[in-house]
Amino acid sequence: MKKILILSLLFLSFLGLASCDQEGIETYSGSDSIYFAPSVYGISDGANTTVTDSTGLTFALDKAEIVGRIYNIPVRIQGKSSDVDRKVKITIDPKSTAVSGTHFKIPENFVIPAGSVVNDLPVTVFRTEDMKKNGFLLILNLEENESFNTNMKSRVVNNLTNKKISFITFKLSFDDKLTQPIGWYAPYLGVFSAKKFFLMCDLIHLEPAMFNQKLGSVGLSIPDIMYYQAFMKRYLADQKASGNTVYEEDGKEMVFP
């Protein structure tokens, strides 16, 4: 009797395995989620990485010949890669103040390529005259389509303020308004002005954008700043001695401390 019971259990186990083999193991078959990667992986400035759903750029420290820039926003999927290209639906939020075709351009068709889980969305930003007085905001939204869902909405990053970061909305602001950059050290370089700043950069062959870094960064150590100061003081003195005094836009003589 005991032997028959054991044989029966073995037979039932065999039937169960055969059934599993025929039906297969059920796997996830839903669409993958799409999201803006900076909301998870952050944006790096070379020293630090900040998780965010927004960022800004300015043309203020660019030379006059720079008429536009391309800003790449990584878009990722939560899921597996596919053997075909998959379209991503991106819309421009009506709250945007930037005008498509005037201030920016994005691709009409954007995809996550076959075999990949990420792709950079290139946003072409045009440098326009009105950016010298006004800042503009572009808000991009990821929308659900036949390839992707938007189940990843947002998450709270500060429980005290209840501040949230969106996975499916990204804000890009831009302008051309020149203000004193963080790398300008007034005790040695004096009162900031656009004319003084660009004249110094041209004469010493400095990239203006380097002053968008903190004091102490490459090219902005105290010895560097002291050299720039001494060079410009000598240049201004030589110009004045030869009868070509350099003046600021307001008519005052340009000086370095």
Image (spheres, helix red, strand yellow):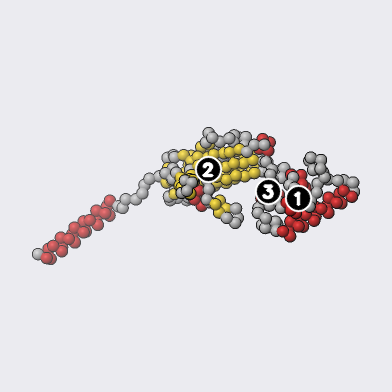
User: Which residue shows up at 24% across the image and 53% down it?
Assistant: 19
The amino acid marked with disc number 2 is: Phe
Classify residue 110 as left or right of residue 25.
right
User: Which residue shows up at 19% across the image and 58% down it?
Assistant: 12
Q: What element carries label 3?
A: loop
User: Which residue shows up at 63% across the image and 38% down it?
Assistant: 135
The amino acid marked with disc number 3 is: Pro
Q: Is mark 1 on a helix, strand or loop?
A: loop
Name the residue beneath numbered marker 3: 181
Q: Is mark 2 on a helix, strand or loop?
A: strand
Q: Residue 134 carries which label?
A: none
Name the residue beneath numbered marker 2: 170
Q: Pointer 2: residues within 10 angstroms few (<14), some, or many (20+)?
A: many
Q: Which quarter of the figure is the N terminus placed in? A: bottom left
Q: Where is residue 101 in the image (x, y as percent from the top left)?
A: 60, 35
User: Which residue shows up at 70% across the image and 58% down it?
Assistant: 221
Inter-mark Cα distance, 2 to 1: 38 Å
Q: Where is residue 66 in the image (x, y as percent from the top left)?
A: 69, 43
Q: Residue furthest bottom?
A: 3
Q: Position of residue 158 (x, y in %)?
A: 48, 49
Say whether disc 2 or disc 1 marks the residue closer to the N-terminus: 2
Determine if residue 248 is in view. Answer: yes
Q: Pointer 3: residues within 10 angstroms few (<14), some, or many (20+)?
A: some
Name the residue beneath numbered marker 1: 190
Q: Which of marks 2 and 1 is in front?
A: 1
The amino acid marked with disc number 1 is: Gly
Contact, mark 1 vs mark 3 (Cβ under 8 Å): no
